[in-house]
Amino acid sequence: MAKVSTNITIDAEVKKQAQELFADLGMDLSTAINIYLKKALAEQGIPFEVSRGNRDTLSAMDEVKKMEEHPENYTGYNDIDSLKKALGV
């Protein structure tokens, strides 16, 4: 397979840290990037989830949105003692 040279712009610190990581894994940056590209081609997309936050964060954001849309479905507490009483603690 013919190889070609490609220029990309990478943050200097990210590149340094990536080179150190991949060196510990026994490969150079070019090999790691080639692995990533081959995996992306095999999956026909980015080979990991791309999101604005993790699932717990997204779930919490959805819950807050629901609370804002329907506050009558949720009980609020003004102090810790009221919350403990409601929880039976």
Image (tube, rainbow, N blue to C red):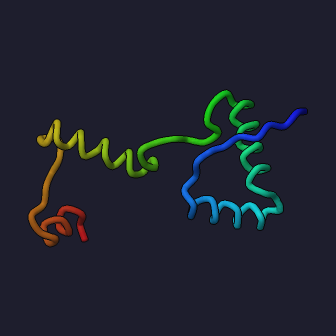
Position in image of residue 75 (x %, y %): 15, 51
* Residue 4 shown left or right of residue 57 in the figure: right
Q: How many marks?
A: 0
Q: Nearer the viewer, residue 65 or 15?
A: 15
Q: Nearer the viewer, residue 88 or 5?
A: 5
As drawn, 14 above or below 41: below
Q: Nearer the viewer, residue 11 or 61?
A: 11
Task: Give the residue drawn at x 17%, y 67%.
Answer: 85
Position in image of residue 76 (x %, y %): 13, 55
Task: Give the residue drawn at x 76%, y 44%.
Answer: 35
Task: Give the residue drawn at x 69%, y 35%.
Answer: 40
Q: Nearer the viewer, residue 42 or 28?
A: 28
Task: Specify the quadrant that holds the N terminus.
Answer: top right
Task: Specify the quadrant that holds the C terminus.
Answer: bottom left
As drawn, 82 above or below 59: below
Q: Quadrant of residue 11?
A: bottom right
Position in image of residue 39 (x %, y %): 73, 38
Task: Give the residue drawn at x 69%, y 31%.
Answer: 43
* Residue 49 shown left or right of residue 35 in the figure: left
Q: Quadrant of residue 4?
A: top right
* Residue 70 shown left or right of residue 23 in the figure: left
Position in image of residue 53 (x %, y %): 42, 48
Q: Residue furthest left?
A: 78
* Residue 89 shown left or right of residue 73 in the figure: right
Q: Residue furthest right?
A: 1
